[in-house]
Amino acid sequence: MKLKVYADRMSQPSRAILIFCKVNGIDFEEIKVELSKRQHLSPEFRAINPLGQVPAIVDGRFKLFESHAILIYLASAFPGVADHWYPADLSRRARIHSVLDWHHQNLRRGAAGFVLNTVLAPLLGLPLNQQAAAEAEKILISSLTKLENIWLKGNGKYLLGGLRPSIADLSLVCEIMQLELLNGKDRDRILGPHKKVLQWIESTRNATRPHFDEVHKILYMLKTKLSEQQSNQADSVMESRIRTPLTSKM
């Protein structure tokens, strides 16, 4: 039976799974689970993943959730996946695991939390939380600094000094790509100082094209929509100020 991938392309981990499958020629069926419509909470999807989160996969009778576990399974179970994604060498594998373990409590907490509380919350019917955004930003900036000083230390293009990308590169870059939803000023303020990170993102994009851009298309489209909304709001404020008569105190 064909592999089934349950995903929402607005989800960073979902994008990593989809790109990995496409790059490695894995035959699969993409089943859309729209988070904005609460489809991940349906009884049908909870039968696949009781936690109600994407991504998840079904391979025959085998069900699996959690994106890092899925990437490891796909790299191990499907023939034709290049060794650099998840090396047979145990020491290299262990180092990849160390990055993936670090990711969840650091980069993901910072990036996902900041974007949620500055951009995405209203789209999901949630209130913006400035305090949560500020705390997430601190974690995000600290994580980007650690990426440069620890994981991207050396002459390699990729994490851990690699010359070719691993599943860790794909997972973490897809996480950072969520920052594309920020306005240009915030994105440049946060990412601009981290030149190695920017180069690494571009290297990972180039190594996985055209699939990287195709899977991220939904993100680019939402960014354009958000930019147009912000521009319209700014125009409305300006028009309101022009129409409001000047008053003076006597």
Image: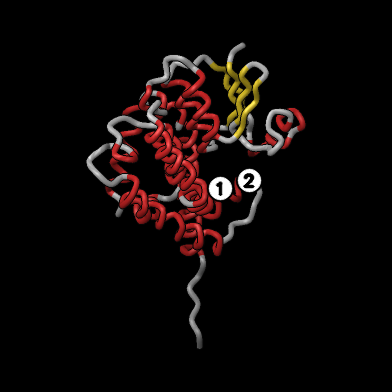
Q: Residue sitting at 63 percent across and 33 percent down? A: 34
Instruction: Give how far across and how far down residue 152 sits, in percent.
Output: 31, 45
Residue carrying label 2: 124
Q: Residue sitting at 38 percent across and 21 percent down? A: 82
Instruction: Give how far across and how far down residue 137 sits, in percent.
Output: 46, 58
Q: Is residue 55 visible?
A: yes
Disc 1 and disc 2 in contact, CB within 8 angstroms: yes
Q: Amino acid at mark 1?
A: Leu
Instruction: Give how far across and how far down residue 10 sits, in percent.
Output: 54, 36
Q: Which residue occupies the foreground of this view, 9 or 222?
A: 9
* Mark 1: secondary structure: helix
Q: Which residue occupies the foreground of this view, 53 or 101?
A: 101
Q: CA distance from mark 1 to mark 2?
A: 7 Å
Quadrant (top left/top right/bottom left/bottom right) for the N terminus:
top right
Q: Residue sitting at 64 percent across and 30 percent down? A: 33
Residue 114 relative to residue 201: left or right: right
Residue 85 relative to residue 104: left or right: left
Residue 37 versus residue 125 in the image, above or below: above
Residue carrying label 1: 120
| Image disc number at residue 50 | none
Residue 21 relative to residue 145: left or right: right
* Mark 2: secondary structure: helix
Q: Residue sitting at 49 percent across and 44 percent down? A: 101
Image-quadrant location for residue 212: top left
Q: Is residue 227 visible?
A: no
Residue 113 versus residue 225 in the image, above or below: below
Q: Which residue occupies the foreground of this view, 97 or 6?
A: 97
